[in-house]
Image (cartoon, helix red, strand yellow):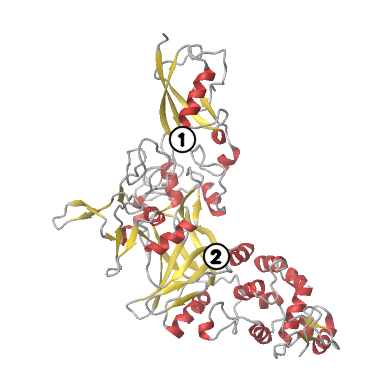
Amino acid sequence: MAESIIIRVQSPDGVKRITATKRETAATFLKKVAKEFGFQNNGFSVYINRNKTGEITASSNKSLNLLKIKHGDLLFLFPSSLAGPSSEMEMSVPPGFKGFGTPNVVEDEIDQYLSKQDGKIYRSRDPQLCRHGPLGKCVHCVPLEPFDEDYLNHLEPPVKHMSFHAYIRKLTGGADKGKFVALENISCKIKSGCEGHLPWPNGICTKCQPSAITLNRQKYRHVDNIMFENHTVADRFLDFWRKTGNQHFGYLYGRYTEHKDIPLGIRAEVAAIYEPPQIGTQNSLELLEDPKAEVVDEIAAKLGLRKDTYFLSSEECITAGDFQNKHPNMCRLSPDGHFGSKFVTAVATGGPDNQVHFEGYQVSNQCMALVRDECLLPCKDAPELGYAKESSSEQYVPDVFYKDVDKFGNEITQLARPLPVEYLIIDITTTFPKDPVYTFSISQNPFPIENRDVLGETQDFHSLATYLSQNTSSVFLDTISDFHLLLFLVTNEVMPLQDSISLLLEAVRTRNEELAQTWKRSEQWATIEQLCSTVGVQLPGLQEYGAVGGSTHTATAAMWACQHCTFMNQPGTGHCEMCSLPRT
């Protein structure tokens, strides 16, 4: 009988031991590897060396002994997506790093940009401490790494959380350059597919049981700053609270840029606020189903914006965790293709000086996992506390702990029933620029905001005609560059322009008046003007704005709009050409 040997095979999922014999062929051995790791026969490659040299092919003529593979040797398995060098991977990670993540994930543009930056903190020569020439370096002037805690703590104000890309640099530093770094997402659920016992609650084992969680204050954050482009964006949102006193909710749309005050930092710049359907009172808030949500996201994307945060006037960690789970951060270093979230929360709250203050925060990745797997509950009588659920026959919940200091100064571990939410919150600074930025035009008489019927503010063609009559700018782009107006043109039920507004959105995004003028001469805008003229509001300069020159006003006076379908009919007809219903 041939002598058995054990070969170790290392993969991105860990190390497994394969029992074989010296006379066993390479093809037979690779079949055992495929069965053990759950791969198809051609879904992976096995190498003798870590640097992907010495590949073991499925040969029936070569034995393990001939390949000089001995008892206890360590081989290296790479899935097909990682089996060879990837130029795309090399472009988006720090030099010298090859991780075990998901290389085909498309990261955000800001992540791709920051991953190519040096990130080091360069310091000039200190005339008092440095004793070397102008070309030398010492401990007092050598560049610091972006994750240097002492440097971050001495900033003004001090930075408690390093940036996410600085955290990645910390993981990928050192001698091994983070070759086996993988950002694992926490799971609080029982692993499926365990066949050694009955399903929960009748059985559980160490293979499928999720590990206990000890909550730690997260040392990094995915977004380091929230900045409103100008005060008008926030003031128009707060105007609802000033008039009603009720809580209010809004999605903030903007873009992610580099935050240069923090090494490798990310800033969320807010350009507009979309207010979905909701019912708010002084002490509660209920979000209603929004049939326009996908259209709003699509229009914002064409304008170069994305939903990066929401605006709420009370602290709700569970709500924040739910939104962050719905907007994951794409990350190549995670086996799941995503890790954490850039979705942040901005809160309008009162301060001791009786003024409105803006505060930003995120919840940690641990909180996201607890919320995603339905393990965290709020405390009704103590809003500053959460409560980790207990296991039941319907759901297994792992134990959740947090560390605290007792009255004697000793560090103790407490069960998270209840749990101070301060362990789950990450603070983010919220600012306004010294020099305001305007993605959209600011008007003295702005177009009404959506879903504010409770205030008597409605979006219809009468409000559109009123807006156009009060904004008589000679620059059409300034008149049309209003986020809420653009949403109305796309989502109104009378004449939605979703299929024909791309040119106008491109003009607004690039601030191109020529493209805006081209779209203004289209039939769609001419029809919009005709509809506006039927609501009893005279548009000054209609002939100038019209798409058919000087005959527009005359044609408008002669044509009539059907009361049933709003179709514009030619003069002299008694029935609508579209729906065939009588004129009166």
- The residue nearer to you, when weighing 185 against 129, is 185
Q: Position of residue 515 (x, y in %)?
A: 74, 68
**Disc number for residue 303:** none
Please name the amino acid that badge 2 sits on: Gly
Q: Is residue 562 visible?
A: yes
Element under label 2? strand
Q: Residue at x 54, y 21 (%)?
A: 56
Tell me what residue is drawn at x 44 percent, y 56 percent: 262
Q: Is residue 540 above or below residue 129?
A: below
Q: Is 319 left, or right, of 92 in this rendering?
A: left
Residue 151 or residue 137, whichever sits in front: 151
Nearest to viewer (mark 2 / mark 1): 1
Is residue 521 visible in the rendered structure shown here? no
Q: Is residue 554 left or right of residue 1?
A: right
Report how many numbered discs are placed on residues in the image.
Answer: 2
Q: Disc 1 designates what residue?
A: 12
Judged from the image, the secondary structure of the residue bearing numbered disc 1 is: loop
Which sits earlier in the primary sequence, circle 2 or circle 1? 1
- When the figure is inspected, residue 561 is found, relative to residue 133, above or below; the finding is below
Q: Residue at x 40, y 16 (%)?
A: 5
The crowding category of the residue bearing disc 1, from other C-alpha atoms within 10 Å (few below 14, some 14 to 19, many at least 20), is some
What is the x, y in percent for residue 203?
32, 42
Give the image quarter of residue 489.
Answer: bottom right
Amino acid, disc 1: Pro
Q: Which residue is mark 2?
A: 254
Q: Give the camera-side residue of 199 and 372.
A: 199
